[in-house]
Image (cartoon, helix red, strand yellow):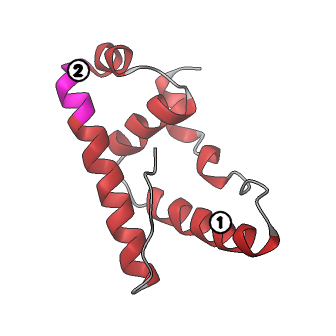
């Protein structure tokens, strides 16, 4: 799958929540929905970066080659985009806190 297809196929962010109990599943589905909405607001470059890393499971060195950027830049961009998503979701959820990493 090429870069263009990866940009267009954002179905990764619409996956069902893992089976971990009815109460947890409802919360996870809500979180996945919020993430999907927030991912749709990202730039094409940010979506591409997330798609290459999380969907296509490329390493940062490979992504650096595809995007013609140094590995350090890819790492910092990934960190920045994850923080951006986390902050936006937390803001939308109000005072609820999301624990753990998004990737």
Q: Measured along the vertical axis of the image, is residue 73 above or below residue 47? A: above
| Image position, residue 33 (x, y; %) | 61, 67
| Dot 1 crowding, Cα within 10 Å, few <14, some 14–19, many 20+ | some
Is 72 magenta? The answer is: yes
Q: Which is in the foreground here, disc 2 or disc 1?
A: 1
Is 20 magenta? The answer is: no
Q: Which residue is found at the position 75% from the left and 76% from the top?
A: 23
Which residue is denoted by mark 2 in the rendering? 71
Element type where label 1 sits in the image: helix
The quarter of the picture where residue 78 lies is top left
Image check: 61 left or right of 51?
Answer: left
Q: Which residue is found at the position 46% from the left and 81% from the top?
A: 93
User: Residue most toward the bottom?
Assistant: 95
Q: Measured along the vertical axis of the image, is residue 77 above or below residue 19? A: above
Q: Which residue is found at the position 34% from the left and 22% from the top?
A: 60
- Prevailing SS of the magenta stretch: helix
| Image position, residue 51 (x, y; %) | 49, 36
Residue extent of the magenta highlight: 68-75
Q: Which residue is found at the position 55% from the left and 26% from the top?
A: 56
Image check: 94 left or right of 4?
Answer: left
| Image position, residue 44 (x, y; %) | 37, 44
Q: Nearer the viewer, residue 8 or 88?
A: 88
| Dot 2 crowding, Cα within 10 Å, few <14, some 14–19, many 20+ | some
Which residue is denoted by mark 1 in the rendering? 28
Q: Nearer the viewer, residue 18 or 77?
A: 18
Marks 2 and 1 close (CB-CB < 8 Å)? no
Between marks 2 and 1, how big is the CA–CA gap?
A: 32 Å
Image check: 25 left or right of 81?
Answer: right
| Mark toward the start of the polypeptide (2 vs 1) | 1
| Image position, residue 74 (x, y; %) | 26, 29
Quarter of the figure with the N terminus: top right
């Amino acid at each position: 799958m090429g870069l263009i297809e990866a940009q267009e196929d954002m179905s990764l962010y619409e996956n069902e929540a893992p089976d971990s109990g009815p109460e947890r599943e409802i919360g996870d589905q809500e979180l996945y929905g919020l993430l999907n909405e927030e991912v749709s607001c990202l730039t094409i470059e940010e979506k591409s970066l997330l798609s290459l890393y999380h969907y296509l499971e490329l390493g940062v060195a490979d992504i650096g080659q595809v995007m013609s950027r140094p590995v350090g830049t890819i790492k910092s961009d990934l960190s920045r985009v994850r923080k951006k998503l986390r902050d936006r979701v937390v803001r939308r959820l109000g005072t609820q806190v999301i624990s753990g990493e998004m990737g």
